[in-house]
Image: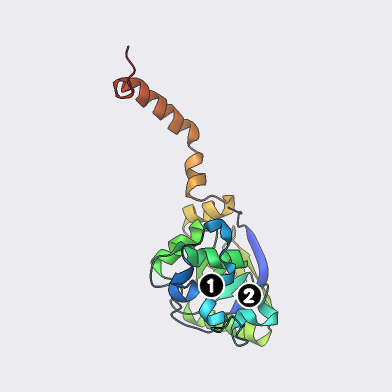
Amino acid sequence: MEPFVILEGIAAPLELANVDTGQIMPARFLRRPRNAGYQDFLFRDLRFSEDGKELPDFVLNQAAYHKARILVAGRTFGAGSSREQAAWGLTDFGIRCVIAVDFGDIFYANAFKSGLLPIRVDVDTCAKLRSQLNTQPGTSLRIDLPAQTISAADGTTLAFEIDPFRKRCLLEGLDEIGITLQYEEVISAFEQGYRHDMRWLFGIHP
């Protein structure tokens, strides 16, 4: 997983509330292999018409936001059913951070596991950020994870909270497998000791 330290990139304002995981990643695309990529199916039914044409009103289809790295949403982003593919679609598209008032609990956890930083801010702050981005399309935000700050388009700096363990995992680019492999020597020693102490289980005789 690519480490997340400082992200500076174009931010797109998503003027929708209660965006659930079914809208982020429709169920009909969930069975694809992980390495096949999910970027083309992100917000599929919001981005495209039934015949596959881009819908010009959707923010990510607008020229100023084609290379967005940050998404500024509203209330309740990522509620609904559990599906890792919702986070995968965002990261595969190139988005590494979503700023919203609140998140669905399962999506929030899946985001960190996928290298995506979800940041909670209050309603007024979220609305102000979107307003600035709408006023100046293509504007960048700067997310400093070590300092836990957002540098806004108007020059203000906003602080955000994050669990220390999740912060460390993002900074070091560690998913659950990566965390486990840090203890490879300890695990190996335990396995060898267990095999020795319980050798009768493995058909090994003294």
Label 1, secondary structure: give it: strand
Find residue 58 and report its horizontal and vertical position in percent.
59, 84
Judging depth in this view, the residue of 80 and 104 nearest the camera is: 80
Count of numbered labels shown in the rendering: 2
The picture quadrant where one finds residue 18 is: bottom left
What is the quadrant of the C terminus in the image? Answer: top left
Residue drawn where x is 63% and y is 69% of the image = 69
Judging depth in this view, the residue of 85 and 9 nearest the camera is: 85
Find residue 62 and report its horizontal and vertical position in percent.
66, 82
Residue drawn where x is 70% and y is 81% of the image = 63
What's the amino acid at mark 1? Ile
Indicate which disc, 2 or 1, sits on the residue closer to the N terminus: 2
Find residue 160 and report its horizontal and vertical position in percent.
52, 67
Mark 2 vs 1: CB contact within 8 A: yes
Q: Can you say whether 196 is above or below 36 in the image?
A: above
Q: Can you say whether 125 is above or below 188 in the image?
A: below
Q: Is residue 42 visible?
A: yes
Q: Residues within 10 Å of mark 1 (few under 14, many from 20)?
A: many
User: Which mark identifies residue 136?
Assistant: none
Find residue 155 and report its horizontal and vertical position in percent.
67, 76
Residue pointed to by mark 1: 99
Q: Residues within 10 Å of mark 2 (few under 14, many from 20)?
A: many
Left or right: 191 in relation to 142: left
Label 2, secondary structure: give it: strand
Residue pointed to by mark 2: 11
Residue drawn where x is 52% and y is 45% of the image = 178
What's the amino acid at mark 2? Ala
Q: Is the image coloured rainbow, by chain, by secondary structure, or in one colour?
A: rainbow
Judging depth in this view, the residue of 121 and 117 nearest the camera is: 117
